[in-house]
Amino acid sequence: MSQDFYSQDYKIGVLGGGQLGRMLFQASLDLDIHLYFIDPSPEAPCSRVSSHFMVGDLQDFDQVYQFGKDKKIVTIEIEHVNVEALKKLESEGVKVFPQPDLIALIQDKGLQKQFYAENGIPTAPFKFLKNKEDLLEQYDGKSWVQKLRKGGYDGQGVTVLRSEKDLKNAFDASSILEEMVDFETEISVIVAQNEQGEIKSFPVVDMEFSEEANLVEFLFSPAEIDSSIQKRAEEIATSVIKKLGLVGILAVEMFVTKSGDILVNEVAPRPHNSGHQTIEGNKISQYEQHLRAILNLPLGDTSIIKPSVMVNLLGEKGHQGKVFYEGLDETLKMPGVNVHIYGKEETKPYRKMGHITVLANKLEEAKKIARSSKELLKVKTK
Ligand code: ADP
């Protein structure tokens, strides 16, 4: 299993150079793993920290192929990438993890849902829609969630249809219509598998969403749910990665319904927002775990060191331009607070600019500090 991955010639390419790439980069240093990034934006968070950064279009066949050609392994930190180029690289002996076929499956919410249905993985009932006309024909006046099959991100490709009057917001595109789930809470399990089939999952976290931004606002680790539900969620996540045969890390987002059932919402085959707290809160971070998985190294101990709460730092409404972090000094004075600033020069409303992880002996205590630090630290312009 051991290999000379620490050699300068052992180049690992990462498609995407955003904050997830930047935290992967941080994790790569201790094991002397050499990451190379490509991102469409010259100002991407990785551009300032890595000397192996290039600008390129992740959707473009030639650019992705040329980038990957001299790499031992290619991985992703965003799933909207050119899969055909990755398939060609794979056929020429470059290891691509997660595997291109699986990226293609996950890029398409329709194929993803079909995979769950065919593999006995619990998920909300759904239908395929070709376009809006198709929706108008099928719509029964009940509550449904319409999701674009491709290209959605951070809630952008999702619209809730509660009645006829919401149809004006419907997408006119290839999509799925999913039954509205009356959920108690949204949870996530991050699970990793290396090439030789070792699998480890992180303990379950639960999330509180901001209605306005449609993004995670707070994340709690461990999740405040029944231990039997936790166990079942970890089993489901493990079975998803096993059935996919995916190498790397997989974030499995799930709903816990009011009656205690678990339904898989969607998966992301890369480090994920719901695993940021693992940097300080767990014995291994999701970032190092991903690197270990794609390098076929032994996976690390995922257990929790201390309860933690993660808060996303989103750009304030009404502020667009050069960023100013208001209240930073006061926030840094608070016990157990770890501030992460992603290095984006420009803020705009709801842009993910950083996060805070608060550790405490009790989750309740971490929650209190997290809620007050969110009030203190504001992402604004001057
Ligand atoms: P994205 O890929 O953009 O994150 P998701 O499919 O995760 O989109 O949906 C975004 C949010 O919308 C979810 O986190 C959840 O709060 C809500 N949502 C999605 N699907 C359903 C559903 N079937 N029932 C109820 N709420 C849903």
Image (tube, grey):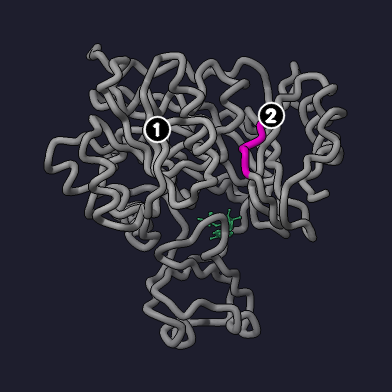
> Can you give x and y, in whole percent of width and height, for residue 81 in the image?
35, 53
Above or below for 118 versus 180: above
Disc 1 residue type (three-letter): His
The residue lying at 40 percent from left, 14 percent from top is 31
For this rendering, which residue is in front, 258 or 106?
A: 106
In the image, 39: left or right of 204? left
Considering the numbered disc 1 on the image, is that residue within a helix, a strand or a loop?
loop
Residue 52: image tag: 1
Residue bearing the label numbered 2: 357
> Can you give x and y, in whole percent of width and height, for residue 291 in the image?
38, 26
Residue bounds of the magenta highlight: 340-344
* Crowd around label 2: few <14 · some 14–19 · many ≥20 (10 Å): many
The residue lying at 51 percent from left, 42 percent from top is 18
Observer able to see residue 208: yes
> Can you give x and y, in whole percent of width and height, for residue 116 in the image?
35, 52
**Cα distance in 3D space between marks 2 and 1:** 28 Å
* Ligand 1 quadrant assignment: bottom right
Above or below for 178 versus 242: below
The residue lying at 52 percent from left, 65 percent from top is 157
Which quadrant is home to the N terminus? top left
Disc 2 residue type (three-letter): Thr
Of circles 2 and 1, the one toward us is 1
If you read the primary sequence from the N terminus, does the residue marked by circle 2 or circle 1 appear first?
1
